[in-house]
Amino acid sequence: MSPLSDPPLTKRQLGWLLILAGGLGALAGLGVDVVSAGGWPGLGPAQAQAVGAAALLALLGLSLLPLGDRPA
């Protein structure tokens, strides 16, 4: 590896990034209700889909953690 190239992103690092992105996305989706920005009472359909997609992203990240330090 040449000294100018960055080391590759590992599967574990990618997993943590996806968990972080999914968690923040789910919190943002649920936070819309706190500030009453949605037009629906409770979770609206698009908001529920967004929170579900963010949760799936976090689950995908969890599945990458055991794969270790191999390049992603």
Image (tube, rainbow, N blue to C red):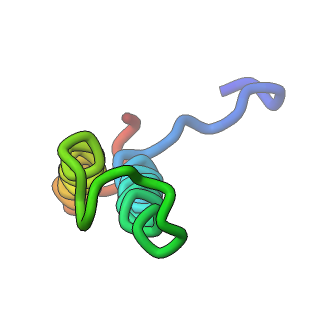
Could you tell me if residue 38 is visible in this image?
Answer: yes
What residue do we see at 39% from left, 57% from top? 29
Nearer to us in this view, 64 or 24: 24
User: In which quadrant is the C terminus drawn?
Assistant: top left
**Quadrant in which residue 35 is drawn:** bottom right
Outermost bottom residue: 34
Residue 13 pos. (x, y %): 46, 54
- Image position of 31 with respect to 17: above or below: below
Nearer to us in this view, 3 or 9: 9
What residue do we see at 81% from left, 31% from top? 3
Could you tell me if residue 64 is visible in this image?
Answer: no
Q: How many marks?
A: 0
What residue do we see at 65% from left, 27% from top? 1
Residue 42 pos. (x, y %): 24, 67
Residue 49 pos. (x, y %): 20, 43
Give the left or right position of residue 46, taking residue 30 as reference. left
Nearer to us in this view, 25 or 42: 42
